[in-house]
Amino acid sequence: MTGKIITISRQFGSGGHSIAEMTAQKLGLERYGREIIEQISARSGFAEDYVNEQSESADAGGIFGAIASTDYYESSNRIAIWTEQCKVIREMADKGPCVFVGRCADYVLKQDYDLLRVFIYADMEYRADRIVRVYGQSDIKPEKRLKEKDKRRAAYYEIYTDQKFGDPKNYDLCLNSGRIGLEESAELIADLYRKLTKAE
């Protein structure tokens, strides 16, 4: 046990990554997100973009279903990336209290680590507006982009963890960032973290 760790899962466009960054700054903790991808890429030899694509979205099949796929090499790559991802996350967690963004960290660490598991969500209108402001315009309507990304992210999470993405039972705290705000959400998480660690 290394001390309490925060894991933040989020809907696409909800600002979960920004909230994780702000939370880590408020608490003086390391924040891991893209760094996980970089580590997997360095160890496996796969390109970062490929690792990123394979490590947070899925159409169907995932780690077990992919075994039955006609594309043997693609299936093997997915399994190798997932295995390495679990190792990297656990090694980072072993360094001490920190904040993880996505990557199924809440599931990977749930057995052996003291976690504060957070889920960030928001309504479609807020997220559609935000992804246009943050990521720019696209030929695809923002609502369609959100639905496709939500579907892939949920499929990946559910395939690899056998848990339902966004189910409140899998988290300690669920926050509507569209109503609460990013800064306020980060402060709520940080405040709860301080209270929990002080109580321990």
Image (cartoon, helix red, strand yellow):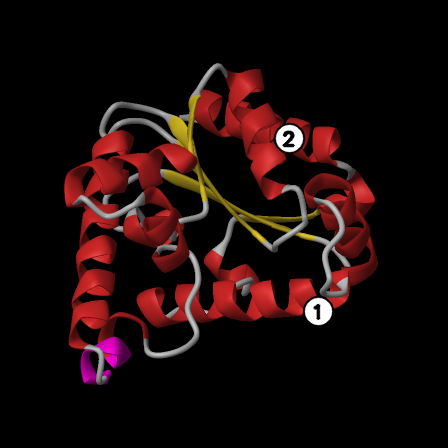
Q: Which mark is residue 144?
A: 1
Query: Is 24 or 1 nearer to us in this picture?
Result: 24
> Which segment did they paint magenta?
65-69
Q: Can you say which quadrant of the picture contains the C terminus?
A: top left
Q: Height in image: 38 above or below 53?
A: above
Query: Dot 2, how many residues are within 10 Å of its Cα: few (below 14), some (14-19), or many (20+)?
Result: many
Please say if the residues under marks 2 and 1 sit with CB atoms less than 8 Å apart.
Answer: no
Query: In terms of secondary structure, where does tag 2 sit?
Result: helix
- The amino acid type of the residue labelled 2 equals Ala
Q: Which of disc 1 and disc 2 is earlier in sequence?
A: 1
Query: Is 125 or 186 nearer to us in this picture?
Result: 125
Q: Height in image: 24 above or below 139?
A: above
Quarter of the rendering containing residue 107: bottom left
Q: Which residue is mark 2?
A: 186
Residue 47 located left or right of residue 9: left
Q: Which residue is painted at 36% across and 55% down in the image? A: 55
Query: In terms of secondary structure, where does tag 1 sit?
Result: helix
Q: Can you say which quadrant of the picture contains the N terminus?
A: top left
Q: Which residue is painted at 76% across and 65% down in the image? A: 141
Give residue 130's position: percent from left, percent from top: 76, 46
Q: Which residue is painted at 25% across and 56% down in the image? A: 82
- The amino acid type of the residue labelled 1 equals Lys
Query: Dot 1, how many residues are within 10 Å of its Cα: few (below 14), some (14-19), or many (20+)?
Result: few
Q: CA distance from mark 2 to mark 1?
A: 28 Å
